[in-house]
Structure formats: structure tokens, C-alpha cells
Image (cartoon, rainbow, N blue to C red):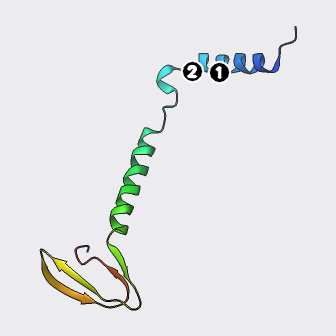
């Protein structure tokens, strides 16, 4: 008796899964998703601490309304970050 391509694959999968213990089946990688999202959020937080001042501009850094610093052109980091 000749089986079609799809039939032979489905029977092969069923035979492999039938022999496995349900506790040993692989679980989806929920931990990997969690750590991936955590890394993305941490990266976004750290990236938000940088700002660029244009070549012909100056920036005033204020904290609670008081002038903390006046910075010139270039890339700067937020003084709150370590």
C-alpha cells in the first residue's frame, strides 16, 4: 500500500510523539521571550539618556526648574544615569 506525502509525515509525527513522555516534551520558550523583552526595555531606557545638540546650538539642562548646566554641541548623556 502506498501512502501520500502528507499521510506519511503525519503518521511519523504521531509515532514520535506517542513514544515521548508528556513531561519530557519540549515547552515553548516563554523564558526566552521574557528575557528578550526585558533586554529591549533596558536598552530603550539606557538609550533615552543620550541626546544630541546641533552644531550651531546650545542646550540648557534643567532639574526641577533650576539650571544645572549649559552644554555645547555634540552628543551628551543624561546626568541622572551612572
Residue 72 against residue 18 in the figure, above or below: below
Q: Residues within 10 Å of mark 1 (few under 14, many from 20)?
A: few
What residue appears at the point 37 percent right and 62 percent down from the top-left corner?
A: 44
**Label 1 belongs to which residue?**
16
Quadrant of residue 13 within the rendered picture = top right
- Left or right of residue 18, residue 8 in this image: right
**Label 2 belongs to which residue?**
20
Q: Nearer the viewer, residue 27 or 43?
A: 43
| Residue 69 image point, x, y percent | 20, 87
User: Mark 1 and mark 2 in contact (Cβ < 8 Å)?
Assistant: yes
- Left or right of residue 2, residue 54 in this image: left
Image quarter (top left, top right, bottom left or bottom right) of the C terminus: bottom left
Q: Nearer the viewer, residue 3 or 19?
A: 3
Quadrant of residue 81 within the rendered picture = bottom left
- Left or right of residue 8, residue 30 in this image: left
Image quarter (top left, top right, bottom left or bottom right) of the N terminus: top right
What residue appears at the point 37 percent right and 89 percent down from the top-left corner?
A: 73
Q: Residues within 10 Å of mark 2 (few under 14, many from 20)?
A: few
Q: Residue furthest top?
A: 1
| Residue 62 image point, x, y percent | 18, 79
Amino acid at each position: 500500500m502506498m501512502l501520500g506525502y502528507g499521510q506519511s509525515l503525519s503518521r511519523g509525527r504521531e509515532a514520535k510523539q506517542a513514544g515521548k513522555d508528556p513531561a519530557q516534551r519540549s515547552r515553548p520558550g516563554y523564558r526566552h521571550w521574557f528575557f528578550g523583552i526585558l533586554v529591549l526595555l533596558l536598552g530603550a531606557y539606557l538609550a533615552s539618556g543620550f541626546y544630541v545638540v546641533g552644531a550651531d546650538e546650545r542646550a540648557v539642562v534643567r532639574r526641577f526648574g533650576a539650571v544645572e548646566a549649559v552644554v555645547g554641541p555634540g552628543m551628551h548623556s543624561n546626568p541622572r544615569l551612572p
